[in-house]
Amino acid sequence: MKLPSHIATLSPYVPGKPLEELERELGITGSVKLASNENPLGPSPKALEAIRAVLGDLNRYPDGSGYALRKRIAEKTGWPVEGVILGNGSVDIIEMAVRTFCAPGDEIIIPHGAFISARLAAQSVNAAILTVPVQDHRHDADGMIARITSRTRMIYIDNPANPLGSFMAGDTWARLVAALPPDCLLVADQAYYEYIDREDYPDGFKDLKAGKNLLVLHTFSKIHGLAGLRIGYGLGDPRMLSDINRVRSPFNTNSLAQAAGLAALDDDAHIARVKELNAREMAWLEAQLDQRKVRRVPSVTNFILIDMGREAAPTYDKLLRQGVIVRPIKNYGFPNHLRVSIGTREENERFVQALDKVL
């Protein structure tokens, strides 16, 4: 079969290396994974209980609309249930939005260093991708505004940013929102927003409620610890989501994910434990890196981007042989950087010990 050129040149997303694969390849045991920004405390106990409760019904198809989970999200946010959409992870919703609103040749503005799935989705429909360089490891709102044309149909921004760990502050964000043309959708990916305790962080949902043309994305993969079930949700104008539902696959979220998400959403105690662990271990790891004069980007997420000052791939390979998996991000345009997820103290100590040997 002959591939269209925009598909033939598309590089598939490469996930973090699984522990089992690493140990099999290198003949080691007891390795730790700090590569995929996963929750080291695991899922909410209430979510696990909810999963067990529906195991006996796996012969039945899930609720195709995920109504119970959408209804609870609507109740917690004060947004109409018709303005909530579920996805097989927030990546699924990004892809649906691109397929719905972007035709070949339409422009999508994506900051350099943004979550790579947005770029893959844009390329898959042969849209024109306009890349805006970062400024001091932050997304440049003014640079994105300058790239807007009559052909711009979408702006994607992850706020906080992955893999940068930084965020766009409120005054800067406000300029970007104010510059939106009426036929351009701003996709605000807020996968890590639960980790932030900053007054200057702009929650895109407030702009959505004010009538701005936004699609706000949240996920259960990070602070809720449900990455293995692939469940996320989007908030948007009900009319817009009605259009996106035209391309949504039937049963795109499974019954276990819906049940777990519903339980996790209300487990405030578990969320608080995860935030406390992350804040404590982030501070500890930052101090360790600073003592070793390893350059890092200030982070408001559950990971740190470190700058090795040289090609990072050899360091990544040596850490692998020490049984520690981190994430090289050359494919994001940062060949000298590694992304390190925040783990438990034991996991973080293991990383620091391995880094000392490598350095």
Image (spheres, helix red, strand yellow):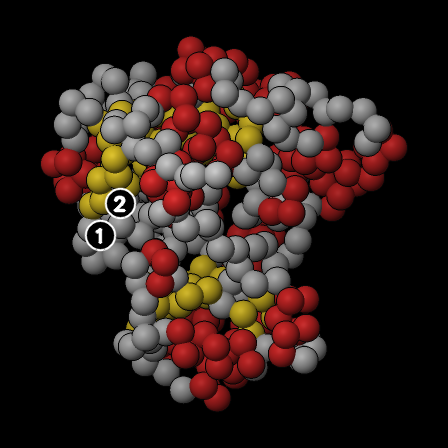
| Secondary structure of the residue carrying numbered label 2 | strand
Residue 8 pos. (x, y %): 39, 45
Residue 185: name its quadrant: top left
- Do the residues bearing badges 2 and 1 touch, measured as CB atoms within 8 Å? yes
Measured as percent of width and height from the top left, residue 34 is found at 54, 65
Three-letter amino acid code of the residue under disc 1: Val
Per the image, label 1 sits on a secondary structure element best described as: loop
Q: Which dot marks residue 111?
A: 2
Spatial CA span between label 2 and label 1:
7 Å
Q: Is residue 16 left or right of residue 269?
A: left
303 over 228 or under it: above or below: below
Looking at the image, which residue is at 26% across and 45% down?
111
- Residue 328: quarter of image: bottom left
The answer to whether residue 359 of the structure is visible from this angle is: yes
- Quarter holding the C terminus is bottom left
Instruction: Count residues near mark 2 (Cα–Cα under 10 Å), then give few for <14, some for 14-19, many for 20+.
Output: many
Q: Residue furthest right?
A: 56
Q: Examine the rendering and report whether any part of residue 346 can be seen.
A: no
**Three-letter code for the amino acid on which mark 2 is drawn:** Pro
Between 125 and 208, the residue placed more toward the observer is 125
Q: Seen from this angle, which residue lies furthest top?
A: 239
Residue 134 - label: 1
Residue farthest to the left, as pictured: 146
The disc, 2 or 1, on the residue closer to the chain's N-terminal end is 2
Label 1 Cα crowd, 10 Å radius (few <14 / some 14-19 / many 20+): some
Q: Is residue 13 left or right of residue 307?
A: right
Q: Position of residue 229 (x, y in %)?
A: 65, 42
Of 266 and 47, which appears nearest the observer?
A: 47
